[in-house]
């Protein structure tokens, strides 16, 4: 067990609805972030994405980071940041939470800053949470064991049974929603999940949601989008 019942309750008691703030990212911050991505050391993950993982806890504080952190503070208030990462992906993110074994943070908000995409896509946040470490949901599937040689700090473990989620309903997932957004995954993966919100993922906006919640991208490949570039900030309080 990563956290005590008390620590979990503290995180769950402050859950809030997902929020999108439209057209709020200043142009200069956007170009600073794009520049940081271009210049940053790339990590080619064996799960597909190319990332630049920046940890304000241990890496030197760059000007672009100080600017970004000041900017997100306007929206989420006091916090500390346990990890951030840029990601260029050509496959939509699968169901997961954002957690850290290394820091065991009192999870607060994730701030997603979309940077580049050919046209807007969608992003889904679910009512269900998981508070025992970073996981990828593979309900109804087999473990991929892609990351068995990597530290758990950086890679999520496979969760093979959604009944371990907080708020698991046991119901089959809504087929209309599935067909509209999530055909990149088998429908079984969504068993027991309910949508908290589906929002637009588009540069200029930011998406703020509870870091403990399960979330995934919509199947952007279906709409002809080839890749997206974003920056996410994972916070605790
Ligand atoms: Fe995430």
Image (spheres, helix red, strand yellow):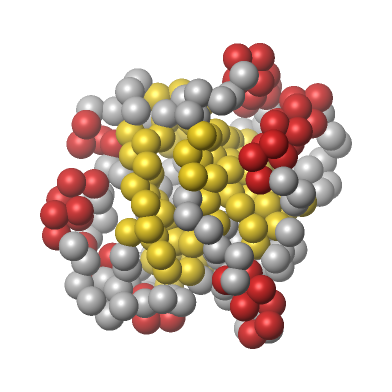
Is the residue 95 above or below the residue 27 in the image?
below
216 with respect to 38 (left or right): left
**Residue under the image location 47 percent in, 50 percent down:** 18
210 with respect to 200 (left or right): right
Of 147 and 191, nearer the camera is 191
Q: Residue 103: where, in percent of width, then height? A: 74, 63
Q: Residue 47: where, in percent of width, then height? A: 45, 50
Q: Residue 155: where, in percent of width, then height? A: 56, 58
51 with respect to 47 (left or right): right
Q: Residue 217: where, in percent of width, then height? A: 37, 46
Is the residue 133 above or below the residue 58 in the image?
below
Q: Taking the image as drawn, is residue 2 in sight?
A: no
**Residue under the image location 72 percent in, 46 percent down:** 77
Q: Taking the image as drawn, is residue 176 in sight?
A: yes
- Quarter-wise, where is residue 95 in the image? bottom left
**Residue under the image location 18 percent in, 62 percent down:** 174
Which image quarter is the C terminus in? bottom right
- Quarter-wise, where is residue 162 in the image? bottom left
Which image quarter is the N terminus in? bottom right
Is the residue 20 above or below the residue 148 in the image?
above
Task: Identify the residue at the far right of this view.
Answer: 60
**Residue under the image location 82 percent in, 41 percent down:** 59
């Amino acid at each position: 067990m990563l956290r005590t019942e008390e620590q979990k309750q503290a995180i769950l008691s402050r859950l809030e609805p997902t929020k999108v703030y439209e057209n709020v990212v200043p142009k200069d911050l956007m170009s600073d972030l794009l520049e940081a991505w271009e210049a940053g050391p790339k990590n080619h993950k064996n799960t597909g994405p190319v990332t630049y993982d920046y940890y304000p806890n241990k890496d030197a504080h760059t000007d672009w980071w100080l600017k970004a952190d000041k900017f997100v503070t306007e929206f989420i208030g006091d916090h500390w940041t346990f990890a951030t990462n840029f990601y260029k992906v050509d496959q939509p993110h699968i169901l997961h939470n954002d957690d850290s074994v290394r820091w065991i943070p009192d999870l607060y908000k994730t701030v997603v800053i979309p940077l580049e995409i050919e046209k807007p896509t969608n992003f889904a946040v679910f009512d269900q949470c998981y508070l025992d470490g970073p996981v990828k949901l593979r309900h109804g599937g087999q473990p991929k064991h892609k990351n068995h040689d990597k530290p758990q700090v950086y890679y999520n473990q496979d969760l093979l049974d959604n009944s371990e989620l907080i708020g698991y309903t046991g119901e089959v997932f809504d087929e209309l929603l599935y067909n509209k957004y999530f055909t990149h995954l088998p429908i079984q993966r969504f068993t027991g999940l309910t949508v908290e919100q589906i929002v637009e993922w588009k540069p200029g906006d930011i998406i703020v949601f509870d870091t403990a919640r399960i979330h995934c991208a919509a199947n952007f490949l279906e709409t002809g989008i080839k890749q997206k570039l974003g920056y996410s900030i994972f916070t605790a309080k």
